[in-house]
């Protein structure tokens, strides 16, 4: 079993740490919140007082923080690369921009470390159940070294390509999920306003060519499918402001890749409108409020 | 077994007639093309020389023609309503605008007939195999009367609501299918340009939250899934110009329903661009040419 | 001086009638509202009790009604074409879809009448001041015959082409105006959120390459230009719901013309969202509420 | 008269240097291209061999380079801030992202220098004629110190706010220009396909509410206005790839400002499609090729 330093103990990082402990690993943890550290300690982790302390004298460092500038900071300035012992394997599971991911990869490589970016899908439920999907970017050797640790937190561990391409893959997927949420809101509202019952729309489309995972499981129209947060006043689930973050990342990636995304761009604008209207903390399915403002 | 008048013997109508004959019904057919009539006669139908002749002295009239003005014409001017015997049940399986569907419904009702709109999904393959889905609009009584005939041509017969709501439901579904095709083209191209292999993108997204029926089965990126027309130089399948027709119908429906469809509108613009570039006869998956012009 | 039948005495039709009377013409008027008729009578018009009465025994018939189906109805069913004397010149100043305009043109021509479509720009203020612009469609002969009457109501009388092309021209112009209103809202809000004072944004852009008539005179950001309804809590001016009507006409025209309008489509969706939120009676400049919901 | 170090001698920088010399200033210049340096020397400038040499022992440093990373590099790494004497005033006239502009501002301020960002509008013609508009960001003191130098190169010198807000203002303006170019292409093509002559469309809209500076002076439809590059096979003018650069900057700014730009986003997608099709070196007016591919 391995020694693992884990930095970032939020809604996702917390349960990931618990699963690593269950899998038999030894954990050193750090977070800006003392409460988050204490919670991890109760699960069997060892507290540390800094990023550097958490990342020294371990076999693996796993990071799970909000945005690209955080990742740059903790790797390049706060010192993971400075503090880590030779041979430490770095795993960044944050969802960040491809550019930051590649910059940190390069720095890690220059310093002689194996590193992968490994953003996840599956949400808090997947983190808790240990069933996350990891989309990994990095060289084959780094991927193979990181894999046993990832298997302690997830089910589906995919190698997507070189450094940064885990992020690229995730962003492509999440752009589609955001588009599909808005598209479902458009079609359900249009159908309802034309006079079709939402139940029938759901039933027919769920078995026809227009269906998507989001349409079937998180339909923005309340009360048409049992699993949708729309049924519960849009209580998340996956918050709309996080979906906007991912859509914004997709648009930054489109810029880097010099590629056009007319639907990705329109979905980004719609989610920005939703957040501007004060609904960022609701579930992604609340995007229906942009199309049908009377939705509750 | 019933006497059925069938008007419109094209790619869809032809095989639908053959299946009705196989189911034991007696068919009188009409089309503007003599060849199409002859082909139906070889399958056992009786030729007629006009819409009126085909729709007189039958139990059911089924119509399968290109656009709304055709339906208005054959019902209101060319005389189905004038020629049909009392008690004849009318089934329009054309995909047309909701407004025309409702106008013809009203006229049929005023003339004392049972009528349903019953557009299909499933394409030429479904028509041939007798596995079409029928999305039906009309009163319950008309639906029940029409059902036995529809069962001779399809598997899934759904009552979507009052007159015109079969069309409404189909248009909502097909708008989503068009959006999903463009969205898939955007995500696959972006991922590829970021450096991810199309195979990996397909594999990951097909099992993640961004997936859709179109992404999985008709992916616009060639050679990532076995069933896509993209693999075969975009040979249809479902022609892009027909998808544009359905998207245009969706935008007309959005206007009638006073509802906003930002993605539906953007997809319509993109398909118009594709058709403007001369690719209307290719499969819908060729929408990738708008995003990645070098696609072949 | 001429005898003129005028049908439709609303916000636009009322002042147009008064200007025709001032110009020395003799007016017979009709409207569904008795109040509107009485108001015209006070200005010197003769009341009538039907469309047919207003359009019989006159040299010209002018119509100014809300939508295409109204125009079809009063010309084809209610009887302008039936009631008018040979040689009567028909002028439809309503803003309607190109298809309806062309259908009525054709019927008028078949019945032996000269007809033009002559939608206006200039709004209520222009109607009152007699400074409207008329965009005219019809043959040269009809245009020349109608011109003297139009000169009693407007300044700029343009022949745009054959029947329906007055409507086509107006719709192209108004689509641009709608796009420019939304574009101005986007740029002003973005600049303000980046930290630039709205006054400076207005000053710089009004003298630079990004400027437009709408940006300069009806800027959606309150208090940057003296003429904008945005300064007065978005009191119209030109109501947002009428702009949506014109944008919807543009999208129907795009369908007829088989042409793509990605910006026209996105603007239509945004105005539909504005109207869905209950702001249809505000000025067009209130479109800023879609981008900056806290606008007042 | 002042000593000025000038870095970046391209299509814009070259004529700006010549105008500064004409205004009586003493110039030290640097560029990666020796030819560009030689050309400036012939106009009276003194050659240098590095960024550092050009920016030492001068009163002002002016930079005019392609992208944000260039600006970061020459200020922060290549050493303008390291080489410049105390009291040197820094002027960056490049068009770059707001983030880079603000980062360099901050570094300059920390090092004790006055600095402004001063992107220009007016193009190569304005640079040559000395009639550029400068949109300036920085504190009032820096702006006043820089003004006399800017007056040697332009006519209209505007103070837009604190550091970076010159860039912000320019990006808002150019986003509108890009939108207006695409909007003009949509309206002109739609009108033409409806049957209106392009000349009449241009004449009517140029005097109506839909008009914009771009519509009037750089109309994408060939041969409707004398000044448009569209008349000359889209020879630039302002290259489409530079417009895409500015639109991409606008979308990055929208992300920073947390604001929605549905039209800005759609225009960005359309210009990316144009560039993807190989037309990046044509004038911006060639955007009509996305709407009307047969345009030449």
Image: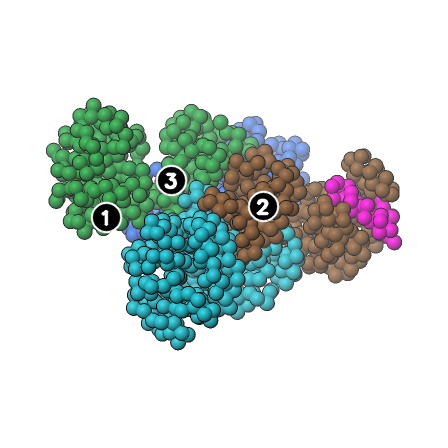
Chain colours: A brown, B cyan, C green, D blue
Which chain letter goes with mark 3?
C
Residue C164, percent across and down? 27, 47
Q: Which residues are magenta?
A: A1-28
Q: Is residue B99 visible?
A: yes
Horizontal side, residue D110 vs residue C131: left or right: right
Secondary structure, mark 1, is helix
Report the Cα–Cα distance between label 3 and label 1: 22 Å
The relative height of residue D102 versus residue A2 in the rendered view (above or below) is above
Question: Are dots 3 and 1 in contact, CB under 8 Å?
Answer: no
Q: Residues within 10 Å of mark 1 (few under 14, many from 20)?
A: many
The relative height of residue B63 versus residue D137 in the rendered view (above or below) is below
Q: Is residue C155 magenta?
A: no
Residue highlighted by disc 1: C105
The relative height of residue A5 versus residue A295 in the rendered view (above or below) is below
For the residue pair A169 and B15, the one nearer the viewer reads as B15
Q: What count of labels does the image hold?
A: 3
Disc on res. C245: 3
- Whether labels 3 and 2 belong to a single chain: the reply is no
The mark lying in front, picked from 1 and 2, is 2
Q: Residues within 10 Å of mark 3 (few under 14, many from 20)?
A: many
Q: Earlier in the sequence, mark 3 or mark 1?
A: 1
Q: Is residue C161 visible?
A: no
Disc on res. D166: none
> Which quarter of the rendering shows the C terminus of chain D?
bottom left
List the single residue furthest toward the bottom: B42
Which chain letter goes with mark 2?
A
Question: Are dots 1 and 2 in contact, CB under 8 Å?
Answer: no
Q: Residues within 10 Å of mark 2 (few under 14, many from 20)?
A: many
The mark lying in front, picked from 3 and 2, is 2
For the residue pair B69 and C246, the one nearer the viewer reads as B69
- Whether labels 1 and 2 belong to a single chain: the reply is no
Residue highlighted by disc 2: A224
């Amino acid at each position: 079993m391995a020694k693992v330093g884990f930095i970032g103990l939020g809604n996702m990082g917390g349960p990931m740490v618990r699963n690593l402990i269950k899998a038999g690993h030894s954990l050193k943890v750090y977070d800006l919140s003392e409460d988050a550290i204490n919670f991890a300690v109760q699960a069997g982790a060892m507290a540390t007082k800094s990023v550097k302390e958490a990342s020294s004298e371990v076999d693996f460092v796993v990071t799970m923080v909000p945005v690209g500038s955080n990742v740059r900071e903790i790797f390049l300035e706060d010192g993971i690369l400075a503090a880590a012992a030779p041979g430490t394997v770095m795993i960044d599971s944050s969802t960040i921009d491809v550019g930051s991911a590649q910059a940190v990869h390069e720095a890690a490589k220059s310093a002689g470390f194996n590193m992968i970016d490994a953003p996840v899908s599956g949400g808090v439920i997947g983190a808790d159940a240990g069933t996350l999907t990891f989309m990994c970017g990095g060289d084959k050797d780094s991927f193979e070294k990181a894999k046993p640790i990832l298997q302690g937190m997830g089910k589906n561990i995919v190698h997507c390509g070189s450094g940064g391409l885990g992020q690229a893959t995730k962003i492509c997927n999440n752009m589609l999920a955001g588009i599909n949420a808005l598209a479902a809101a458009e079609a359900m509202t249009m159908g309802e306003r034309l006079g079709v019952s939402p139940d029938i729309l759901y039933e027919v489309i769920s078995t026809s060519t227009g269906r998507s995972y989001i349409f079937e499981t998180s339909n923005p129209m309340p009360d048409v499918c049992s699993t949708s947060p729309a049924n519960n006043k849009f209580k998340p689930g996956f918050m709309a402001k996080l979906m906007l973050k991912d859509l914004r990342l997709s648009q930054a990636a489109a810029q880097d890749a010099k590629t056009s995304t007319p639907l990705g761009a329109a979905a980004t604008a719609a989610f920005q409108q939703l957040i501007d209207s004060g609904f960022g903390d609701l579930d992604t399915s609340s995007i229906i409020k942009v199309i049908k403002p009377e939705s509750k």
